[in-house]
Amino acid sequence: MHRFTRLALMPDWLRAARLLACIALAVVATGCALPPLEGRSQSHALPAAEARSTALGQAVDAVAQQHPGLSGIHALTDAHEAFAARVQLAQHAERTLDVQYFIWRDDTTGHLLLEALRAAADRGVRVRLLLDDFGVAGLDEELAALDAHPHIEVRLFNPFVSRSFKPLGFVTDFSRANRRMHNKSFTADNAVTILGGRNVGDEYFGATDGVLFADLDVLATGPVVGQISNAFDAYWASASAYPIASMVKAPSAEVVAAIAAREALIDRSERAAIYKKAVRELPAYGALIRGDLRLIWAPARLLVDDPAKGLALAEPEQLLLHHMHEAVGTPVRALDLVSPYFVPTDSGTDYFVDLARQGVRVRILTNSLAATDVLPVHSGYARHRQRLLAAGVVLYELKPEPGESVTKPVRRDEGSWMPGGSGSGASSGSSLHAKTFGVDKKRIFVGSFNFDPRSARLNTELGIIIDSPELAASMSEIFAQRVPLSGWEVQLHPGNGTLQWFDAAGTPPQTLSVEPGTTWWERAAVRLLEPLPIDWLL
């Protein structure tokens, strides 16, 4: 039957419903267009010669001259120190701050760092803030108000057109919306940078009574800073970076006043006061400017995805993963890997199995089912455990131990990003978030890259390879001494080949036959998800 004849024979209510559906689809379609990018301001990182003339540049240059061609690295293993370092850079920057993050929380530390950026801009520092739009829930007005400052510009990566209901973007433009900017860097005066796994939020900086993330950043100076600044420029000018002013209307004077009042209330809150006091009392506070911060000097190289990956337009040779093997080489003796969201897939499992069978000691630490914050990701890892173990790969899964108090920072051993284990119990637990690996006790990677398909194929990522036997040996020592106590070692039962979990820290040490700290429905959910072809989304 001709389609027009069918339409004529439809009941009135059905024709009306169909018409309304078409109108709704038309509204959605026309409302899903992003604004044009023409007219964006153009800007670049501070030139190296000018960077050396700043206070930060002079503070690090005097020491850097003794280590030509090398980058100075300081591991930020403590959550409070990681926050303090960012505040320090904002306070001491004189010319520029280039800041790039996946998540920026609408919470205490999130607002304290926004205020630090605003205070720097008030001194005349140019601030460029590039944020992934998926991770800034509830901050549209605050960011728009910040963008109104004459020395601050805010851009959103792969923004959602619908500001009130962002999930709509996954329906109308899934291919683009599913690609996020996972990079994290905080660079001051093109002289000092911080990069690694931490986003901005209370759970990353030890300022919450909820779950704390065990994470790792590094503070870096020297040639690698220029590489990171160049990468920031590329993302800032990319076809995925939209000025927030084109997405969010400028706030009214009343809204700006309300935001200022709210931020002042947060700044005067007991939690903020306690946290700022705890940060001020850290021994390392101010060490960088004083020139007595301990730095490890080593060759360092940036690995970063081309920002075109955010639009599925990057060629394979433009991706971080393509350059990983070239930069790292093939492990000969040992590979120590830390990944909170570890989804090796069949090909990745083949890689680890082949290394183990060639005599390479492969040790992997990821979250246990009890510690993970993304249950489907655990299913993408769980299905590969028996193959890995059968080949001789050593698997550890982090315990969700009680975290540390926001009022009493616990100093961890230098180079350790593991939960302290002796914390006050103020938080409800810990979850692994660090992304790092060490090869042959010679080099180490620190960055945002998870060993999962999402990091490899969808999200943009950033990290550095550091040719430092000292840092790599420190990581190996953590695996030897701390990991067995902070995690369960997954093993194969010698009789029937089923999985079991060995707890070396138990009194006495014990072996468990069921995934510890989990409920039956969590285990059932993992088993249901394991056979599904969803690895590419994880």
Image (cartoon, rainbow, N blue to C red):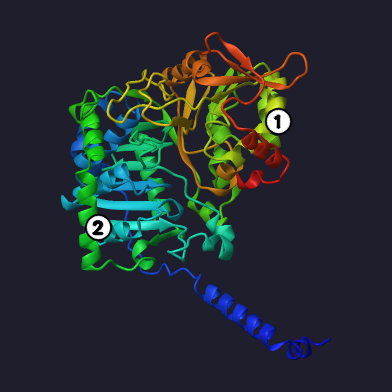
In front here: 223 or 438? Answer: 438
User: Disc 2 vs disc 1: Cβ atoms closer than 8 Å?
Assistant: no
- At x 36%, y 26%, the residue is 404
Q: Nearer the viewer, mark 2 or mark 1?
A: 2
The CA distance from mark 2 to mark 1 is: 53 Å
Horizontally, residue 330 falls left or right of residue 444, namely: right
Q: Secondary structure at mark 2?
A: helix
Q: Residue furthest left?
A: 123
Residue 375 image offset from top left, x and y in percent? 58, 39
Q: Which residue is mark 2?
A: 259
The N terminus appears in which quarter of the rendering? bottom right
In front here: 307 or 537? Answer: 537
Q: Is residue 84 above or below residue 496?
A: below
In front here: 368 or 466? Answer: 368
Horizontally, residue 105 falls left or right of residue 479, namely: left
Query: Crowdedness of circle 1 by 10 Å Cα count: few (<14), some, many (20+)?
Result: some
Residue 310 image offset from top left, x and y in percent? 52, 54
Whether residue 86 can be seen here: yes
* Amino acid type, mark 1: Asp
In front here: 487 or 60? Answer: 487
Q: Which residue is mark 1?
A: 350
Whether residue 53 can be seen here: no
Residue 259 image offset from top left, x and y in percent? 24, 57
* Amino acid type, mark 2: Ile
Q: Secondary structure at mark 1?
A: helix
Q: Is residue 436 above or below residue 96?
A: above
The quadrant in which residue 296 appears is top left
**Mark before the other along the chain sequence, 2 or 1:** 2
Q: Residue furthest top?
A: 508
Residue 169 image offset from top left, x and y in percent? 53, 62
